[in-house]
Image (cartoon, coloured by chain):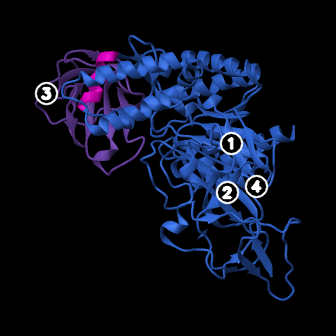
Chain colours: A blue, B purple
Amino acid sequence: MTSLRAGPLDPKGFAVLRSGIRWLADEGHNCKPGELLAYCNVGLAATTRQEVMPFREEWRDLQVAFLSPGSGRLRKADVSRGGFLDRHQHHNHWESDLTIGNLELRPGEKPMAPSSGFMQLRFFAGRRATQLADSPSGLLTGWYDRARTWHADVSGPFTTVLSLGICEQTGIFRGEKDAFWELAALLSPLTHVVWSSDDSLVPTVRVLLEQLQRTPGQQREIEADAAAALAALSPAPTGADWFLIGGALAALARSPLEESYNLLTRGGIVRAGPADIVVLSLNAELAHAFRHRRLGYTFTVHGYRQVELSPALKAWLKSDFDVVTRSAADVRKDYYELIDAVRARRPARFVVLNSFSSSIGDEVVNYAAFDRPMSNLVASVRAKELNLMLYDLARERDVAIVDTDELVAMLGAQHHLPDGVHQSGLVQGKLRERIAQIVNERIAG
Amino acid sequence: MTTAVIKAVHVQEGAQLPTGGKFLDVSVDLTSYAEHDCPAISYFRIAVRERAWVRRVTITAGDEIVPGTALAHLSTDPAEALDDVPSRAARVSVAGILYQPEWW
């Protein structure tokens, strides 16, 4: 029999609190080593005076998962109390002798517990898009503008991998259950994985560059201008409009490329970031963006959200913004500028997912019908030109390419990328493996 | 998909279209078929694959059309009578295009 012991968490200056245990495996389940068995919410209580509390932006959504230390049939201990007591983190103290159950072995089976005798722990943290977005139904189930995970049984130094793409990266990074599980299983334990949302602002390289360079004063000017302009609209924006614009303004104020992080480990709280490896997507390079006429900032929103905007918000965008076409040359220039700006601060590795560039359903026999530059008009031509640009970036700026285009062409787009963006699980898995390989090579030096 | 919206018509009645000449742009909104997340809307350009005279255009930008709608009548001869039943569909090609700023 192998005891499922949690082991110590002892950050200096804090007591660790926890909720009851929520199970992810059934009683009697035939567990495999490293399998996710259960999780709980975790909080910190200061035992000495603290200037700034760690996890200040994530304290409601800090969770820890327990990994199976070996094989055997799961026998659960009485560690769940149900209701809010399994959701709120302040009901129990974390105690190093916490045992959540055991793995029952059959005759001839040997325990495979690690040398410490404790289960391995994996932490998860979500930063809510708004603190109102309360969705504690499971592991990382909230509406987050940023979610992340790391291993608690190493003390670092951690290599931070930042996902800055659109929905195609969400599937690769967060996986089938949105909790990074498939990717985490492929990565070195020294990896800290961060996923950034594209809900409120699409992370084109132009937007990322502006976020990197924007001063707090400029951000205040953007917020004041938007508030005044929206308040002057007739008809007035609805509550839902303010929600949407609030999310966009909050996203404009952040710079994901410059964020640093707290990580709770067995050895205490350690710092990580800003990102050592940045994963971008050519699919984020929308052909058109809004540029504010007076303040000059770029605002990018997915087309399907753009058409859903209310008349008030459309009126604001039409009166205060120009629609600018972002040519392949513009994207190229922005990429070089962004990479150079980040590398002036630190030696970051850039990884870029290219776009699927074959045409699905196109029947073009003559390109006379398309004005030049065709990359501003024909989707497949734009994808090809941007993909080609990546080879220059790879050569001149040492960027790693994740070749979605080749993979999907090989597997078949009709079955694995029917709309050109959203992949099947098989493609997500292959792309995940490639990204993990790049990350692990970087960590291995 | 049950309908499409004409975003732009690139031809005028009486004009001659060369092989490969651009004809019109349409958007297809998949949300009219089912509630759908990104990318719900696709845009396409239709071009002709043969030389033809534009004799009659029956749609304008902004029209919502159903499958099977006749968009225009083309002929190989500029003086061909239009009161006969069309002999065949025009040969066209289709390409997925990007949203254009002038549509905003």
Q: Which residue is mark 4?
A: A10
Circle 1 crowding by C-alpha within 10 Å: few under 14, some 14–19, many from 20:
some
Circle 4 crowding by C-alpha within 10 Å: few under 14, some 14–19, many from 20:
some
Q: Are marks 2 and 4 on the same chain?
A: yes
Secondary structure of residue under mark 1: strand
Chain letter of mark 2 equals: A
Q: Earlier in the sequence, mark 4 or mark 1?
A: 4
Q: Are marks 4 and 1 on the same chain?
A: yes
Q: Are marks 1 and 3 on the same chain?
A: no
Quarter of the N terminus of chain A within the rendering: bottom right
Estimate the spatial distance between the alpha carbons at disc 3 and disc 4, rounded to whole Å: 87 Å
Q: Residue drawn 73% across and 56% down? A: A185
The kind of residue on which mark 3 rests is Leu
**Would residue A310 appear left or right of A131 to someone viewing this image?**
left
The kind of residue on which mark 4 rests is Asp
Numbered tag placed on residue A262 in the rendering: 1
Estimate the spatial distance between the alpha carbons at disc 4 and disc 1, rounded to whole Å: 15 Å
Secondary structure of residue under mark 3: loop
Q: Are marks 3 and 4 in contact (CB under 8 Å)?
A: no
